[in-house]
Image (cartoon, rainbow, N blue to C red):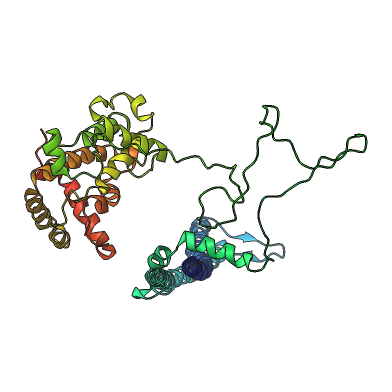
Amino acid sequence: MKGLQESNRIHDSLADNGVAFAAALNTMSEELTELSNNIEAGRKQWKNVVTGSEKKGPTSYHEMEKARNKVDIAAKEYESARNGSRSKGFLGNNRNPEEDSRKKLEMADMEYVRQVELTNKVHSELFHVERPQSVKALRDLILECDAGLSLQLQKFVALNESFALNNGRAVSGNGGESDLRKALLSVDDEADMNGFIMEFASKSPPQQVGMMKFEVQKHPIFPLPPVQQPQQEPPRPSEPQQINPRPPYDPHAQGAFGGGGAVVTPAPRPVRRPVKPVFGVPLEVLLQRDGNAVPIVVIQCMTAVELYGLNVEGIYRQAGATSHIQKIKEIFDNDPSKVDFRNPDQFFQDVNSVASALKQFFRELPDPVLTYALYDEFIESAKIDDDNARRDALHGLINRLPDAHYATVRALVLHLSRVMQYSGQNKMNSWNLSICFGPTLMSARQEDLKNTNWQHRALDTILRNALDIFDED
């Protein structure tokens, strides 16, 4: 039980990491919302300021034009008065229209001059003071927003790193006793079950388990005396046969719980041994045995995918039905010569199961397609920064593969290149395919999680340069 308890503890730790990560993200969201609200409030405030400032210019210009029109009207009246005659007022005084018009003209001109000066002042303040202030304020708001967003993005990166690191420590335990793999491998099902049963058995009083013996009890209606001893007669068909006594309970015994000798557990169904195994057989052996440079299972599965799976979203990423995958394995392990995946009925109309079976074939190879011997060199080549140099280095390593491995990887890469041509429908570009196939085609003898991204990068480079590395016939 200790292994399962340790596993549960590690999973609780993973859950706590997730909760802490979610809480930190929620805090970041609240801070970003507050930043956004502050920036929006500042923007609206300066929008009102700028709108009011910009309205001053047209208003002052309009007033200046009105003053100019008044000057024009007063000038016309003055011209008319100069050409006219004097008139008498009500009291008999002589009025001089020319003088009155002249005064009105001078007053209108003074108002016009004052309005021009005011308009120039308003425009000067607008261009030299208010607009620069508004632009500077908006620039400061933008910089404040960018700085706050950059800070939150840096915190987001740090949170992701911390989350991944804490999960990694919880799972691996840095090689200590809290290693999840060790905890699960230490689980002993039979010992745990026996310990669980014995724990409860020790709490209950001992009971003797054996055959129960019954005596005949005659009904009072019978006048015959009680039978002292049964007659020795052969059993008749209508009489029940004797039931074997139940054996004492044995926690290690095979059979149903609590059953006696009368309960029989059916024998397990015999496993059918492959007649001509394909899965788990080295590529060199398949080449020598079948005479095909590319295994039949690879050819048939790629044919099915190219006929029926190129437009399927998530092909090679979506898993097929386990029962279908197992049946496809049995078909190839027993009589692959009769397989024709051009007929979809032969793979149960489930192209995802065909894709999963193909990946399983590569996973079960004793030596990966890109071979253990060249694994370290593939990883080092993937670390090259220059795209062309990285492509050439990987190309050279592929040329060093054994014949069976070279032919198989060539067929698969060209097939995946055709899958990539339909990435608009199936969403599987070179990087997504490299995630699906990288650890399958290229793996170390020991688990190598730290180089997983380099595996993806190596296969991604090969897929993007498929036609440069391989000639498509």
Q: Position of residue 142 (x, y in %)?
A: 41, 69
Residue situated in front as seen by the camera: 341 or 465: 341
Residue situated in front as seen by the camera: 404 or 15: 404
Q: Is residue 72 visible?
A: yes
Residue 301 position by quadrant: top left
Left or right: where does residue 341 sit relative to residue 231? left
Q: Is residue 41 above or below residue 404?
A: below
Residue situated in front as seen by the camera: 243 or 109: 243
Q: Position of residue 109 (x, y in %)?
A: 49, 67
Q: How many marks?
A: 0
Residue depicted at 22% across the width and 37% down the height: 298
Residue 296 position by quadrant: top left
Left or right: where does residue 161 sit relative to residue 208? left
Left or right: where does residue 143 sit relative to residue 8? left
Q: Is residue 311 visible?
A: no
Residue situated in front as seen by the camera: 183 or 438: 183
Q: Position of residue 433 (x, y in %)?
A: 28, 47
Q: Position of residue 215 (x, y in %)?
A: 78, 45
Q: Is residue 200 above or below residue 250?
A: below
- Placement of the C terminus among the 4 image quadrants: top left
